[in-house]
């Protein structure tokens, strides 16, 4: 009987070490899993922010293109008016000379 009592005492520290190693492995795996999930969430938020920024840029680009088209149309009408006035001045100068 004394042998079995001594053997059970020898197994307790070994079992404690085994439980510690298993606990350490579980905690390490949990830390890796949580870190990966956090990184994926962070990347997803970054992708959404990037997509929103690109969408805003596209809206601004379309607005700028429309403003340029309006300005070009206004400039064309002004150039047409200047050509008409210049044509009238040329006719007047030809008739005077």
Image: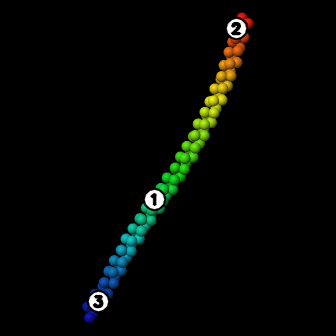
Does label 3 or label 2 sit earlier along the sequence? 3
Question: Which numbered dot is residue 1?
Answer: none
Q: Which residue is drawn at 52% across and 49% down?
A: 51
- Name which quarter of the figure residue 18 lies in: bottom left
Q: Distance between the residues labelled 1 and 3?
A: 52 Å
Q: Which residue lies furthest to the right in this view?
A: 96
Does label 1 or label 3 sit earlier along the sequence? 3
- Name which quarter of the figure residue 89 lies in: top right
Kindly check if marks 1 and 2 are in contact, taking CB atoms under 8 A apart as contact: no
Kindly check if marks 3 and 2 are in contact, taking CB atoms under 8 A apart as contact: no
Answer with left or right where residue 36 lies relative to residue 51.
left
Q: Which residue is drawn at 70% across and 18% down?
A: 85
Crowd band around label 3 with a 10 angstrom C-alpha radius: few (<14), some (14–19), many (20+): few
Q: How far apart are marks 1 and 2 (CA)?
A: 79 Å
Q: For the residues carrying marks 3 and 2, which lies nearer the camera in this image?
A: 2
Q: Name the residue under label 2.
A: 94
Q: For the residues carrying marks 1 and 3, which lies nearer the camera in this image?
A: 1
- Name which quarter of the figure residue 37 lies in: bottom left
Instruction: Name the element at disc 1.
Output: helix
Q: Mark 1 points at which residue?
A: 40
Q: Mark 3 points at which residue?
A: 6
Q: Is residue 27 above or below residue 77?
A: below
Instruction: Pick the residue in front: 19 or 3.
Output: 19
Q: In this view, does 52 lie above or below 79?
A: below
């Amino acid at each position: 009987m004394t042998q079995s009592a001594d053997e059970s005492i020898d197994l307790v520290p070994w079992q404690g070490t085994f439980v510690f190693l298993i606990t350490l492995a579980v905690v390490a795996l949990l830390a890796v899993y949580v870190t990966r999930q956090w990184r994926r969430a962070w990347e997803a938020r970054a992708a959404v922010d990037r997509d929103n920024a690109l969408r805003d840029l596209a809206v601004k680009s379309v607005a700028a293109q429309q403003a340029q088209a309006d300005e070009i149309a206004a400039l064309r009408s002004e150039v047409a008016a200047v050509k008409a006035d210049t044509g009238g001045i040329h006719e007047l100068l030809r008739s005077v000379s």
